[in-house]
Image (cartoon, rainbow, N blue to C red):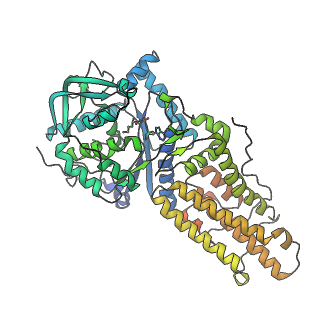
Amino acid sequence: MEKCSWKENRYGQIDSGAIAQMKRGITYVTTPIYYVNAVPHIGHLYSTLLADAYCRWTRLKDPLNVAKLITGTDEHGIKVQKAAEVAKEEPQRFCDQVSSKFKGIFELFGIEIHDYVRTSEKRHYFAVQHIWDEVSRRGYISKGYHEGWYDKKEEAFVPQNALDSISSEYKDNLEWVNEENYKFSLKNCHDHIQNFLARPNSIYPPKYASSVQDFRVQDELSVSRISMRASWAIPVPGDSSQTIYVWFDALANYLTSLGYPNEKHAWKDENRIIHVVGKDILRFHSIYWIAFLAAAGLKPPNQIICHGHWKMNDVKMSKSLGNVISPCALAEVFGIDASRYFLFREGHIEHDSSFSWKFAQERINSEVVDTLGNLLSRSCRFARPERWYPAFYAESLNNEDCELMSILEQTAKNVATLNEDFQFAHSLEAIMDSLRATNKYFAYREPWSLVKSEAMVNKHVLENTLYLTFEALKISAVLLSPFVPELSNRVLDHLGFSEELLTLKLARLHAGKSSGIVSKKMILLKRFSHTFE
Ligand code: MSP
């Protein structure tokens, strides 16, 4: 057996035209590829939104950063095969229909997709068969008999020690398999798995890493099925009686999107590869995927970001339980910006989140409409007809001004740290806290009284009040841009900051020059007043 090491660089040639970019490296953020046996719900959307916000954040920090989002659909396997049968469709046609629904939802929600991989595509077949050959050539795959319980829902064999904890109703999802299969030697990858898990923050938040540590890694894994049983799958190269195990096939999508097995593929040390996954599929990514990559002589991903689930009444949202919220329904009720806001604000990576229409409405109204929208409209009422942006009189600053200025500077710093760790719910909380502080400051200063005063000192206080309020709105809009890009653009545009100025540098006091065209009237978002059961 060949020793596997990701230091080995079989594809080490550097594309000369891309040398400058290589130095900086590209950040690839992947989402899981979604099963097409069911239509999208907000849980799927959430995984993809996390990746979108991180890519946008990476570019916001420095427009020279290249961050690319990769997503797509997982189209093979018995589960999809059965769903196509139920729908009385050919599997390919069925997959085309559902896959385009996922893509349509992501586009509707303004997610910027660099590549959309479908496992039924030719390029993917090619990549999967290539990695299979490579892993096989290195001695990690052999033929033998396999028997055990197969979980059709999870598309995975159930480890012996997990059988006792399976409920009797769930047992319907299990089938006894006793057949000749190809087996992958996980035993020879244990060190690689352990090294990956031991690397700080390779799995983030760290609490999830311990759940994987507890998972006993089997010595071998069945990586094929008899074609007659699993016909809707990629054939094993050179043995059409067997098809490749869906997770081996699905995980390889990450390589497909990076151009593997082409010599100039991007799965290289100089690029940063981050996988975003829900907690239910962490095991496949942090154990099997690491092993497959090691066996193929490829480096592990740089990081796996894991997130909690969306629940309805304390139960995980899932199509099979019929308790899902459709992204379209959410968009119809609240529009795109407010829906994105809510999902980021209430979705958490470190724990599960509950969905409630009533609560979503309250959250959006109190934060986007009242805290942000009202501050914008109340302060813009003071806009003057001529080109104008409030002036800043450093010599007239008092304690409240200085306190607000330090809150604003600190918020930008805190958000930057939180965003690096995908802690977006906390970032939004910090932005809202700073806007609440600005609202308080604005109300305390009573600009409506100051405007009536003729005293020069009050004129300066008025200008400083409006200036710092506008700056707070500007800074918040920049920091909000990875989450609600359209809404953020509207705020900046209203304050006279052009789109070209939108980089993180603008999230500082006194940064950027406004055109001075600020109109008095502005309604950012109307209050929602739906009645929910
Ligand atoms: N096809 C596999 C992934 C293969 S990746 C190489 C799969 N698909 S899935 O459609 O079932 O799930 C895809 C993602 O959606 C997972 O990250 C999963 O955690 C996420 N979600 C599915 N339901 C969810 C919630 N209720 N809440 C949040 N995310 C959840 O697994």
Between 183 and 169, which is closer to the camera in this rendering? 169
- Residue drawn at (17%, 49%) of the image: 4
Q: Quadrant of residue 226?
A: top left
Q: Quadrant of residue 171?
A: top left
| Up-down relation of residue 228 to residue 111 (above or below) | above
- Residue drawn at (57%, 37%) of the image: 327
- Residue drawn at (54%, 58%) of the image: 426
Question: Picture coordinates of residue 41 (x, y %)?
Answer: 53, 35
Answer yes or no: is residue 64 visible: no
- Residue drawn at (22%, 40%) of the image: 218
87 sits to left or right of 260:
right
Count of labels in the image: 0
Picture quarter with the N terminus = top left
Quarter of the rendered image showing ligand 1:
top left
Q: Residue furthest top?
A: 88
Q: Quadrant of residue 216?
A: top left
Picture quarter with the C terminus = top right
Question: Picture coordinates of residue 506 (x, y %)?
Answer: 59, 66
Between 38 and 220, which is closer to the camera in this rendering? 220
Q: Residue furthest left?
A: 1
Question: Picture coordinates of residue 179 (x, y %)?
Answer: 20, 23
Answer yes or no: is residue 77 visible: yes
353 sits to left or right of 249:
right
Between 329 and 390, which is closer to the camera in this rendering? 329
359 sits to left or right of 1:
right
